[in-house]
Image: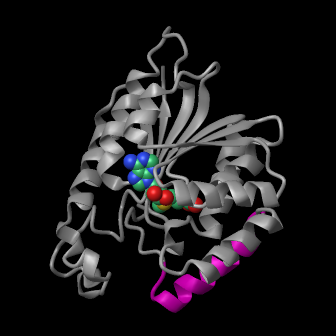
Amino acid sequence: MKEDTPILYPNERVGARVGAYAQEHTTGIPRHIVEYHGYVCDTMPETANYMVSTSQAQAMSFLAKTLGAKRILEVGVYVGLSSLVWSHAVGPEGRVTGLEFDPSFANLAEEAFKKYGVKNVEVIVGDALKTLPALSPTAPYDMIFIDAQKSGYPEYLKSILESSLPGSQNRLLRPGGLIIGDNTLRCSFVADDSEDNPWRQFDFGPRRSEYWKSDDIKTLRRYNEMVTEADRLENWLCPLWDGINISRLLD
Ligand SMILES: C[S@@+](CC[C@H](N)C(=O)[O-])C[C@H]1O[C@@H](n2cnc3c(N)ncnc32)[C@H](O)[C@@H]1O
């Protein structure tokens, strides 16, 4: 029988080489997105790791195109990198709505959209715990990307499911649409907080000491349980990057 355990690569160096090879042999994302990613890493090093990586961006774009997505909702925009990916994936006739709490991040995102001539993204500034339930789209979204504060994930999921009931007017997500929860394995700790996990010795910085015990880890576990237990969803928790939980709405 084939092993289920994803012992992906024997060490970090091999992992990095395989990652680079896979990225080179995957359809690329447009140049301006790669350029913007590099620019944010150079100019905002403190927060640049909020962004998805360029290889995750390739996978997200592939997924959205495979689904034929034309309308995508993003919860957590930061400075607009992943919005640029969705904007590219839906094409000029498609629409992206982003929800972002921090006005200064939203402004930087708007500047980037202007710079790159992107006209199909709208950012709504405010707490997504309020702005998400207030949405009443004229047509449902094909895909929803959850990438804001981890403590909000269960509430976002609950709200999406409640706003997407069969037969409801202005439903949020269409039947067959995807909900993608980012960071749902969180440096492995969501699945494994045992003492022999070497990542426990890693310095994640002062705000994340004893990270494996943090409320974020507990909330992400709750999110993963919710999508697994929901009769209305099928899901795949993909153990790549920081873990992406991809759920498909059945009804
Ligand atoms: C991980 S970053 C998003 C990164 C972005 N999706 C990307 O890959 O380029 C998370 C963002 O969520 C925002 N955020 C946090 N709490 C929020 C809330 N309650 N409502 C809306 N946005 C929130 C933060 O300000 C931050 O910009």
Query: What residue appears at the point 73 percent right and 44 percent down from the top-left corner?
Result: 65
Asked if the magenta segment contains residue 26, the reply would be yes
Q: Quadrant of the N terminus?
A: bottom left
Number of marks: 0
Q: Is residue 88 above or below residue 195?
A: above
Q: Position of residue 102 (x, y in %)?
A: 48, 55
Q: Residue furthest bottom?
A: 13
Q: Position of residue 60 (x, y in %)?
A: 63, 53
Query: What residue appears at the point 68 percent right and 54 percent down from the top-left corner?
Result: 110
Direction from residue 164 to residue 68 in the image, left or right:
right
Residue 86 shows in the view:
yes
Nearest the camera: 183 or 228? 183
Q: Is residue 12 above or below residue 117?
A: below
Q: Position of residue 247 (x, y in %)?
A: 46, 40
Report the magenta stretch's main SS. helix
The part of the chain drawn in magenta is 9-27
Nearest the camera: 250 or 216? 216
Question: Residue 183's image quarter?
Answer: bottom left
Question: Residue 68's image quarter?
Answer: top right
Question: Residue 173's image quarter?
Answer: top right
Asked if the magenta segment contains residue 166, the reply would be no
Tell me the colour scheme of the image.
one colour
Residue 80 shows in the view:
no
Query: What residue appears at the point 82 percent right and 68 percent down from the top-left corner?
Result: 31
Query: What residue appears at the point 24 percent right and 68 percent down from the top-left corner?
Result: 192
Q: Is residue 13 above or below residue 54?
A: below
Direction from residue 40 to residue 197 in the image, left or right:
left
